[in-house]
Image: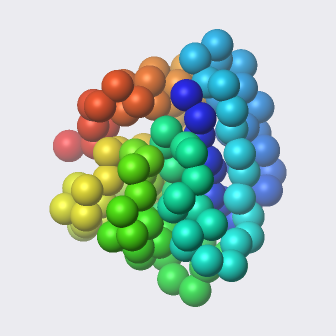
Amino acid sequence: MKILLIDDHKLFSQSIKMILELSENIKKVQLVDNFSTISEIAFNDYDIILIDINLTSLYQDDGLTLAQEIIDNGCSSKVVILTGYSKKMYEHRAKVMGAYGFLDKSMDPDELVKKLEKIYIGGKVFFR
């Protein structure tokens, strides 16, 4: 599985990358902390795109808006929101837009890998 992680917090994103690369099922983890167009992201060959919900220093809007734009542009990757928030309205918005998951940043690393594996095979993972 190939994963793209979009997050503007380098310490966090590099830590997640190291955790994910320990899994034998994950072949590649690419970090993005800047980009110029949605197409740079949306039309690359990733199985899953993990997007931080709070991207204000990287993107002019939040991660949900970026996720919506990626989905609307016909990206075949499974889009997943990574969050430190558990607000129902954000999770609902992610479901409605067609995201495959809404994952909590505070989860156990092994649990994160298991949930990404479930998403990879077509499952969806949400709090509620």
Residue at x 39% of width, y 69% of height:
73
Q: How is the image coloured?
A: rainbow
**Taking 118 as reference, is 17 left or right?**
right
Q: Residue furthest bottom?
A: 60
Q: Is residue 52 visible?
A: no
Give the vertical position of 17 relative to 56 (above or below). Answer: above
Residue at x 51% of width, y 30% of height:
112
Give the vertical position of 20 relative to 45 (above or below). Answer: above
Which quarter of the image is occupied by the C terminus?
Answer: top left
Question: Residue 114 in the image: x percent, y percent?
Answer: 45, 21
Give the vertical position of 85 relative to 58 (above or below). Answer: above
Question: Residue 3 in the image: x percent, y percent?
Answer: 59, 40
> Looking at the image, which is closer to me, 27 or 15?
27
> Looking at the image, which is closer to me, 47 or 85?
47
**Taking 77 as reference, is 60 left or right?**
right
Give the vertical position of 43 relative to 63 (above or below). Answer: above
Which quarter of the image is occupied by the N terminus?
Answer: top right
Q: Is residue 36 visible?
A: yes
Question: Residue 39 in the image: x percent, y percent?
Answer: 55, 70
Total count of labels: 0
Question: Residue 40 in the image: x percent, y percent?
Answer: 63, 66
Which of the 4 image quarters holds residue 37?
Answer: bottom right
Residue at x 39% of width, y 50% of height:
76
**Taking 109 as reference, is 107 left or right?**
left
